[in-house]
Each structure stands twice: as C-alpha cells, then as structure tokens.
Image (cartoon, helix red, strand yellow):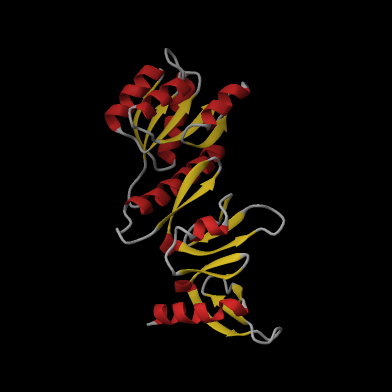
Amino acid sequence: MSRALTVVIAEDQEPDREKLVLYAKRLGLHVLSSVGSGKWFVEDCLSFKPDLVLMDIGLAEVDGITAYKRLAELGVTPYLILVSGTTDSSLLLAGYELNVVGFVTKPVTFERLSAVVGKAVKAFERDLAFTEALADTRIIEIKSNHKPIFINENKLIYAERYKAERKVKIYVAGEDPIVTRSSLAEIQVQCSEQIFHPNKSQLVNLNYIDSVYASVEFFGTYTIKLTYGHTEIDLSRRKRKEFERLYSQIKD
C-alpha cells in the first residue's frame, strides 16, 4: 500500500473501543475517529469518508446494521469489519449482506483482528487497481462470497475449473487465488483475446506464457508453460491454429 487505510471505529463499550483503537494503530491504520453511538458513526463517516470501519453491531441510539445501511443509502460504503459478541443469527446474517470483509468475535484479539484487516487491505488494493485502470484495460467482474470482485485482466494469469464442483479458481498476479462461482465462459466473455481458452477446463493469459512445446505423451498436442510457478497447461489440437494466430500477435 502506498498509504495507510483510514478507519472509523464504532464500539459502545469504552474499554473495547480503546482496545480497537490501539490495535488499529499497531496495524498501521490511520484512525479518524472512535465513537460509541450509531448516530455519531454515521455523522463521522459522512464527514471523513473512511476506507474502512470497525463496527460493533450493538451501538447506542442506532444499531450498527441500521447505521451502516443509512450510510449506504447516502452513497458511502467503506469496507466493513463487524466486531460483536452477539450470537443472534439474524443479526449476523444481516451484517453479511452489507459490504463486510470479515467478522471478529469478542473478546477481540490482536491476531484475529490482524487477519481480517489483512483481507480488507487486499480487497482495497484490488478495487484500487480497478479504479485506476486505464480506459482500454478490461475489468472482469466475478461472483465471490455473495458479492462481486473486480479483477484487472492484465493481472489474471490463468483460471481452471474444478472437475467435481461448479467452481473456478483464478490465479491473479500478486494475490492469493480466488475461488468463484462464475463459469469460465462468463469470465472469458468479459475478456480481450489475450485471455485464451486452450482446453475445456482452463483459461490462460497469453502474456504469462514462458514457452510452448510438443507433448511427449500425445502426438500432435502441445503444452503451454507459464512464467507463474512453472505451471503447465494442455493445448488441445482443435485450439492450436487459433492459439498460434493470437500468440504470434502478442509476441510481435
């Protein structure tokens, strides 16, 4: 990150609020404010426009879920980390329908909060790449954990379908793999020709190809070797001519 993420902390219990402020600063976050009520939480978020909020569900005056929904109605949707000791499943479900990146149960520990903040940083960086992308760069929208994720096409290395499940794993440069319910066809239709379909179960970014060579196991078939982890991908016979045409354009 080129800068620290900004955060507003909302917790009605003062000792817990002070602990969250301390932990947030240790994690390198820039704390804009810390409040105990949902009303103040809304006011401060509208004033400061934080990147992230650490929010307890049970706030004074206005509960956290209602407060965040009010923000969303006003067009402010910072990344949300829920912090609560509630066991009410309806409240937890309502929280996960928001722009939540993680949930930390009380008593909060530094380790648990650190792990969830790490997810928020990755999500922020991913969306930052989206907003700063050049106009001619394709942005791919995929379905993950009940909300969309945006991937810069240039960072997609390859994708493969699980044989036994209706899921796809996408390998992205500089990030952990992403599992999605989007199909290979739904992904490829959003892409330029640099994202190629070499066989029935995989997609590959032609810009990450290290070499191509004839398969020693099957006559007339080829293997694509990527620069990423020495990954090898099969190139089917019927895709060979199309691959040669597109790959020659990339190399030129």
Quarter of the C terminus within the rendering: bottom left
Residue beneath the point at 45% across and 24% down = 17
Question: Where in the figure is residue 66, as x and y percent of width and height?
Answer: 44, 20
Q: Is residue 222 left or right of residue 16?
A: right
In front of the other: 157 or 52: 157
In front of the other: 28 or 224: 224
Q: Quadrant of residue 249?
A: bottom left
Q: Residue lying furthest top in this view?
A: 61
Q: Quadrant of residue 232?
A: bottom right
Residue 76 is at least partly visible in this image: yes
Q: Is residue 144 left or right of residue 129?
A: right
Question: Where in the figure is residue 80, as x and y percent of width and height?
Answer: 45, 34
Question: Where in the figure is residue 203, as x and y percent of width and height?
Answer: 55, 66
Residue beneath the point at 34% across and 32% down = 76
Figure disc tally: 0
Q: Is residue 112 above or below residue 88?
A: below
In front of the other: 188 or 48: 188
Q: Is residue 183 above or below residue 86?
A: below
Residue beneath the point at 62% across and 67% down = 200
